Image (tube, grey):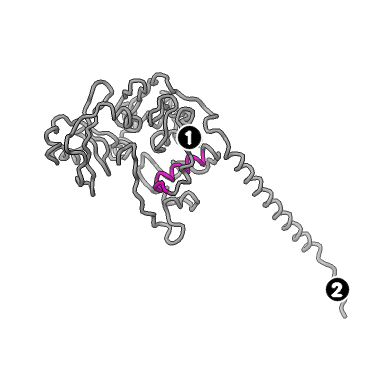
């Protein structure tokens, strides 16, 4: 009978190393979980500063920006969704026929100067003094780009306060909250890039969101959330939009939001997705994914989105089982925007 051979020392060493590696991975996982639990209680208002209640700062307007960026940005900006929040009548030829598209509207057609919205609903505006719009009560639902159902046509009336009370924060630039007046209609470059250092032509890292700037995830999230995180309220004014938010500020020092909506299954998938991402960044301290990880504003493309890794946040809109490219059907509703 052959006596048992002693164990190979190298084999025993490998087994011990594997066991040690497994223990280290377990400890790392537990420590990560512990950090996440600690991060979940962090105060979203604890960093940065804000301009709430202060005068709107002097900023470079878009027409000046386009002097240099006319080829790479200016050529496509007029078709960008961010540029279509408010448009003059002469800049919206596809919407101009709507002013005569209903008998009740046709009577007021000569007064209509601007359009609010362009994809699902269209509202009608006219100037009502410096930095103010009057909003027509009547609106039209678009179906495949054409007029569908008309709403509130019985007695069309101009509402002088509603635009400033509800819409100005996300559809105009440089809002003075006290008087609810704006510096420019639509969204100017300032809305996302803030006050730009004039020396940026020599050093592009001076511009917020520039490739070389390495903008903090919380800053990115704040400036996107100023419009896209719907359902919040300014602590200082009570308005449904922040008080003089300047890109680079901490939005959540003035803007109060209930982040439990991130887990509200009754909320439409699009808005819940935004709440989840913002919560992950400002409450949980996760900086890996921001709005700009998938969404390219200037390019107006979903190319990055298509290349996105499959993560839990993706399944707000995509099917977790079955073809990933298939998205869940949902309808966005907003009591604030009246649709």
Left or right side of 99 for 8: right
Spot occupied by residue 144 in the image (x, y as percentages of width and height): 23, 49
Name the one closer to the observer, 200 or 81. 81
| Alpha carbon distance from label 1 to label 2 | 66 Å
- Asked whether 98 falls inside the magenta stretch, the response is no
Left or right side of 333 for 275: right
Q: Is residue 95 above or below residue 112?
A: below
- Asked whether 278 falls inside the magenta stretch, the response is yes
**Can residue 72 be spotted in the picture?**
no
Within-10-Å neighbours for mark 2: few <14, some 14–19, many 20+: few
Q: Quadrant of the N terminus?
A: bottom right
Asked where in the image residue 199 lies, by quadrant, the reply is: top left
Spot occupied by residue 50 in the image (x, y as percentages of width and height): 47, 25
Spot occupied by residue 308 in the image (x, y as percentages of width and height): 46, 50
- The magenta stretch is 266-281
| In contact (CB < 8 Å): disc 1 and disc 2 | no
Residue at position x 31%, y 23% in the image: 181
Within-10-Å neighbours for mark 1: few <14, some 14–19, many 20+: few
Q: Earlier in the sequence, mark 1 or mark 2?
A: 2
Residue identified by numbered label 1: 212
View extreme (top): residue? 55
Q: Is residue 216 above or below residue 324?
A: above
**Can residue 41 be spotted in the picture?**
yes
SS class of the residue under badge 2?
loop
View extreme (front): residue? 154
Residue at position x 28%, y 40% in the image: 79
Residue identified by numbered label 2: 4
Asked where in the image residue 247 lies, by quadrant, the reply is: top left
Residue at position x 22%, y 46% in the image: 145
Q: Nearer the viewer, mark 1 or mark 2?
A: 2
- Which of the labelled discs sits on residue 77, or is there none? none
């Amino acid at each position: 009978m052959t006596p048992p051979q002693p164990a190979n020392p190298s084999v025993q060493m490998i087994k011990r190393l594997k066991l040690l590696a497994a223990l280290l991975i377990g400890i790392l996982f537990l420590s990560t979980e512990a950090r996440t639990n600690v991060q979940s209680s962090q105060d979203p208002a604890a960093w940065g500063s804000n301009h709430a209640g202060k005068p709107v700062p002097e900023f470079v307007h878009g027409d000046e920006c386009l002097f240099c960026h006319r080829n790479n940005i200016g050529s496509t900006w007029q078709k960008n969704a961010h540029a279509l929040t408010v448009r003059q009548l002469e800049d919206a030829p596809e919407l101009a026929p709507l002013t005569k598209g209903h008998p009740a509207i046709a009577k007021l057609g000569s007064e209509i100067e601007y359009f609010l919205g362009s994809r699902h609903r269209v509202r009608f505006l006219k100037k009502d003094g410096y930095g103010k719009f009057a909003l027509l009560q009547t609106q039209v639902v678009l179906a495949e780009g054409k007029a569908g159902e008309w709403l509130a046509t019985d007695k069309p009336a101009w509402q002088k306060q509603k635009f400033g009370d509800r819409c100005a924060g996300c559809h105009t630039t440089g809002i003075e909250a006290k008087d609810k007046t704006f510096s420019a209609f639509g969204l100017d470059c300032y809305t996302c890039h803030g006050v730009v250092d004039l020396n940026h032509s020599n050093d592009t890292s001076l511009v917020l969101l520039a490739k070389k700037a390495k903008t903090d995830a919380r800053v990115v999230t704040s400036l996107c959330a100023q419009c896209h995180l719907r359902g919040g309220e300014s602590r200082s004014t009570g308005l449904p939009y922040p008080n003089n938010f300047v890109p680079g500020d901490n939005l959540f020092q003035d803007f109060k939001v209930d982040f439990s909506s991130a887990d509200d299954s009754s909320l439409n998938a699009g808005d819940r997705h935004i709440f989840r991402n913002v919560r992950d960044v400002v409450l949980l301290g996760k900086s890996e994914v921001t709005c700009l990880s998938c969404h390219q504003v200037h390019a107006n493309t979903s190319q990055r989105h298509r290349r996105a890794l499959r993560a839990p946040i993706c399944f707000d809109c995509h099917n977790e089982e079955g073809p990933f490219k298939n998205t869940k059907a949902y309808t966005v509703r907003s009591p604030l925007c009246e649709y």
